[in-house]
Image: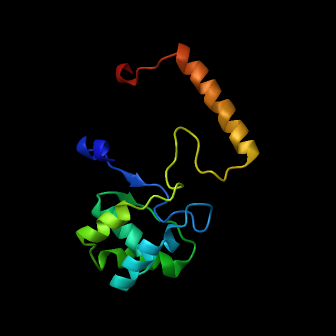
Amino acid sequence: MSYCQGKGIGVTAYSPLGRGDVKKAGLLTNPIVRQVAAAHTVSPASVLLRWNLQRGVAVIPKSANPARVAQNVREPWSFELDAEEVRALDAIEDGGRFCTAPWATFDDRTATDKLVTGLATGLASAIFSVARLDVTTL
């Protein structure tokens, strides 16, 4: 993130609210997030959105609930996290928030998905070991 921002490249949070209760990705129920939300009388989602906004990260939260969509638009702008709260949120590492490139996502993938990912990764590695494309010359 620091590298991209240092080069003027915008960063967008992928799944900024975690993945609900999916294995190792329940950021909305994280005790630190809940504590900060209670201190500001806002939702845990707003805390996570505000944390990203204060770090200069664009957020595109998903919700099928119109009331939550409206809350996600308004509430993160109604408060500011202090430095201590930002540090506490920065320190959250639940083992499931980050994706490994190029296709892997989380630990809860199906056996078929893991097989297809392995085959696609192997194929891409083989292709790119012999073929290179320099897009700067196109």
What residue occupies the far right of the structure in this picture? 112
Percent position (x, y) of residue 48? 40, 68
Tell me if residue 122 comes above or below residue 61 in the rendering.
above
Q: Quadrant of residue 53?
A: bottom left
What residue occupies the far bottom of the structure in this picture? 41
- Image colouring: rainbow
Left or right: 82 in relation to 21 = left
Foreground residue among 101 and 62: 101
Percent position (x, y) of residue 101? 52, 39
What residue occupies the far top of the structure in this picture? 130
Point 55% across, 62% down: residue: 25
Point 28% across, 64% down: residue: 54
Point 36% across, 50% down: residue: 11
Point 64% across, 25% down: residue: 123
Q: Quadrant of residue 128?
A: top right
Please identify the quadrant where the C terminus is shown.
Answer: top left
Percent position (x, y) of residue 92? 42, 62
